Protein backbone atom coordinates (compact mmCIF):
# COMPACT_ATOMS: atom_id res chain seq x y z
CA UNK A 1 0.00 0.00 0.00
CA UNK A 2 1.38 3.41 -0.92
CA UNK A 3 2.24 5.95 1.74
CA UNK A 4 -0.66 8.19 0.66
CA UNK A 5 -3.18 5.37 0.98
CA UNK A 6 -1.75 4.40 4.36
CA UNK A 7 -2.34 7.98 5.52
CA UNK A 8 -5.94 7.89 4.24
CA UNK A 9 -6.60 4.53 5.92
CA UNK A 10 -4.99 5.75 9.14
CA UNK A 11 -7.02 8.97 9.25
CA UNK A 12 -10.30 7.24 8.42
CA UNK A 13 -9.71 4.31 10.76
CA UNK A 14 -8.50 6.37 13.69
CA UNK A 15 -11.05 9.16 13.23
CA UNK A 16 -14.05 6.86 12.95
CA UNK A 17 -12.93 4.55 15.76
CA UNK A 18 -12.16 7.49 18.10
CA UNK A 19 -15.54 9.04 17.38
CA UNK A 20 -17.27 5.68 17.88
CA UNK A 21 -15.47 5.25 21.20
CA UNK A 22 -16.50 8.75 22.28
CA UNK A 23 -20.11 8.07 21.26
CA UNK A 24 -20.09 4.71 23.03
CA UNK A 25 -18.95 6.31 26.28
CA UNK A 26 -21.57 9.06 25.85
CA UNK A 27 -24.25 6.41 25.28
CA UNK A 28 -23.17 4.55 28.44
CA UNK A 29 -23.12 7.79 30.42
CA UNK A 30 -26.60 8.64 29.18
CA UNK A 31 -28.05 5.21 29.97
CA UNK A 32 -26.27 4.51 33.24
CA UNK A 33 -26.32 8.00 34.73
CA UNK A 34 -29.36 9.43 32.99
CA UNK A 35 -27.34 12.26 31.45
CA UNK A 36 -28.56 13.49 28.09
CA UNK A 37 -26.18 14.27 25.28
CA UNK A 38 -26.08 16.51 22.26
CA UNK A 39 -28.92 16.09 19.77
CA UNK A 40 -27.11 15.79 16.45
CA UNK A 41 -30.28 16.77 14.61
CA UNK A 42 -29.87 20.26 16.11
CA UNK A 43 -26.32 20.37 14.79
CA UNK A 44 -27.66 19.45 11.36
CA UNK A 45 -30.31 22.15 11.72
CA UNK A 46 -27.63 24.69 12.63
CA UNK A 47 -25.54 23.63 9.60
CA UNK A 48 -28.59 23.94 7.35
CA UNK A 49 -29.17 27.49 8.56
CA UNK A 50 -25.45 28.27 8.49
CA UNK A 51 -25.20 27.64 4.74
CA UNK A 52 -28.06 30.11 4.32
CA UNK A 53 -26.06 32.76 6.17
CA UNK A 54 -27.46 32.46 9.70
CA UNK A 55 -24.45 32.08 11.96
CA UNK A 56 -26.31 31.70 15.26
CA UNK A 57 -29.55 29.92 16.05
CA UNK A 58 -30.73 31.65 19.24
CA UNK A 59 -33.22 28.83 19.85
CA UNK A 60 -32.28 25.75 17.81
CA UNK A 61 -35.18 23.68 19.19
CA UNK A 62 -37.72 26.11 17.71
CA UNK A 63 -35.80 27.00 14.54
CA UNK A 64 -37.22 25.79 11.24
CA UNK A 65 -36.11 22.17 10.63
CA UNK A 66 -33.99 21.40 7.58
CA UNK A 67 -34.23 18.26 5.44
CA UNK A 68 -32.20 15.31 6.74
CA UNK A 69 -30.92 17.32 9.69
CA UNK A 70 -30.20 14.28 11.87
CA UNK A 71 -28.17 12.57 9.11
CA UNK A 72 -26.43 15.86 8.38
CA UNK A 73 -25.52 16.33 12.06
CA UNK A 74 -24.20 12.80 12.48
CA UNK A 75 -22.26 12.95 9.20
CA UNK A 76 -20.70 16.23 10.26
CA UNK A 77 -19.80 14.74 13.65
CA UNK A 78 -17.91 11.83 12.07
CA UNK A 79 -16.32 14.03 9.40
CA UNK A 80 -14.92 16.26 12.14
CA UNK A 81 -13.58 13.16 13.94
CA UNK A 82 -11.79 12.05 10.76
CA UNK A 83 -10.54 15.60 10.15
CA UNK A 84 -9.12 15.81 13.66
CA UNK A 85 -7.42 12.43 13.21
CA UNK A 86 -5.91 13.82 9.99
CA UNK A 87 -4.62 16.83 11.92
CA UNK A 88 -3.09 14.50 14.51
CA UNK A 89 -1.51 12.43 11.71
CA UNK A 90 -0.05 15.61 10.23
CA UNK A 91 1.36 16.71 13.60
CA UNK A 92 2.89 13.34 14.50
CA UNK A 93 6.23 12.12 13.24
CA UNK A 94 5.97 8.93 11.16
CA UNK A 95 7.05 6.62 13.99
CA UNK A 96 4.39 8.13 16.26
CA UNK A 97 1.71 6.62 14.04
CA UNK A 98 2.82 3.06 14.78
CA UNK A 99 3.26 3.56 18.51
CA UNK A 100 0.90 6.29 19.65
CA UNK A 101 1.49 7.86 23.04
CA UNK A 102 -1.51 7.80 25.37
CA UNK A 103 -0.66 11.17 26.91
CA UNK A 104 -0.24 12.82 23.51
CA UNK A 105 -3.53 11.37 22.24
CA UNK A 106 -5.47 12.40 25.33
CA UNK A 107 -3.85 15.85 25.35
CA UNK A 108 -4.77 16.34 21.71
CA UNK A 109 -8.33 15.14 22.44
CA UNK A 110 -8.63 17.61 25.31
CA UNK A 111 -7.35 20.44 23.10
CA UNK A 112 -10.09 19.70 20.57
CA UNK A 113 -12.65 20.92 23.12
CA UNK A 114 -11.88 24.40 21.79
CA UNK A 115 -13.75 23.58 18.56
CA UNK A 116 -17.22 23.23 20.06
CA UNK A 117 -16.59 25.97 22.59
CA UNK A 118 -15.65 28.44 19.84
CA UNK A 119 -18.05 27.33 17.07
CA UNK A 120 -20.81 24.88 17.91
CA UNK A 121 -21.87 26.22 21.30
CA UNK A 122 -22.08 29.84 20.08
CA UNK A 123 -23.83 28.66 16.91
CA UNK A 124 -26.45 26.85 18.96
CA UNK A 125 -27.18 29.98 20.97
CA UNK A 126 -25.17 29.02 24.06
CA UNK A 127 -22.52 31.69 23.60
CA UNK A 128 -18.77 31.35 23.69
CA UNK A 129 -17.77 28.34 25.84
CA UNK A 130 -21.45 27.83 26.77
CA UNK A 131 -21.52 31.03 28.83
CA UNK A 132 -25.26 31.47 28.14
CA UNK A 133 -26.15 27.85 28.95
CA UNK A 134 -28.35 27.32 32.02
CA UNK A 135 -25.37 25.71 33.79
CA UNK A 136 -22.23 26.89 31.94
CA UNK A 137 -19.69 25.00 34.06
CA UNK A 138 -21.66 21.78 33.78
CA UNK A 139 -21.71 22.14 29.98
CA UNK A 140 -17.97 22.87 29.96
CA UNK A 141 -17.20 19.89 32.20
CA UNK A 142 -19.23 17.57 30.00
CA UNK A 143 -17.47 18.90 26.90
CA UNK A 144 -14.10 18.25 28.53
CA UNK A 145 -15.16 14.72 29.53
CA UNK A 146 -16.37 14.03 26.00
CA UNK A 147 -13.16 15.27 24.41
CA UNK A 148 -11.09 13.35 26.95
CA UNK A 149 -12.83 10.18 25.76
CA UNK A 150 -12.18 11.25 22.16
CA UNK A 151 -8.46 11.44 23.02
CA UNK A 152 -8.57 7.96 24.58
CA UNK A 153 -10.39 6.80 21.46
CA UNK A 154 -7.63 8.29 19.30
CA UNK A 155 -5.10 6.22 21.20
CA UNK A 156 -7.10 2.98 20.88
CA UNK A 157 -7.91 3.74 17.25
CA UNK A 158 -4.26 4.35 16.43
CA UNK A 159 -3.31 1.09 18.15
CA UNK A 160 -5.99 -0.78 16.20
CA UNK A 161 -5.03 0.73 12.84
CA UNK A 162 -1.33 0.11 13.50
CA UNK A 163 -2.15 -3.57 14.12
CA UNK A 164 -4.27 -3.79 10.98
CA UNK A 165 -1.70 -2.08 8.77
CA UNK A 166 1.10 -4.20 10.24
Image (spheres, helix red, strand yellow):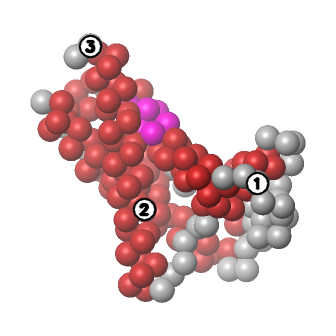
Asked if residue 67 lies left or right of residue 154, the reply is right
Q: Answer above or below: position of 68 versus 6.
A: below
Using the numbered discs, state the Cα–Cα distance from disc 2 to disc 3 in whole angstroms: 31 Å
Does 78 appear in magenta? no
**Picture quarter with the C terminus:** top left
Residue 3 pos. (x, y %): 29, 15
Rendered view: 9 above or below 26: above
Q: For residue 41, what is the image quadrant?
A: bottom right
Q: Which of marks 2 and 3 is nearer the N terminus?
A: 3
Residue 157 seen in the figure: yes
- The segment highlighted magenta reads 82-89
Residue 86 belongs to the span the image colors magenta: yes
Residue count near mark 3 (Cα–Cα under 10 Å), binned few <14, some 14–19, many ≥20: few
Identified at 23% across, 38% down, the residue is 161
Query: What element does badge 1 sit on?
Result: loop
- Number of callouts in the render? 3
- Secondary structure of the residue carrying tag 3 is loop
- Residue 79 locus on image (x, y percent): 52, 41
Amino acid sequence: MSEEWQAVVWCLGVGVSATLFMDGVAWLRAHLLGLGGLDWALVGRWLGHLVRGQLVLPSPQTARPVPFERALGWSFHYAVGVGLAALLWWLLPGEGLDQPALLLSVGFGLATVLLPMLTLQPGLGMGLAARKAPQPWLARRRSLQTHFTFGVGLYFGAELVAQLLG
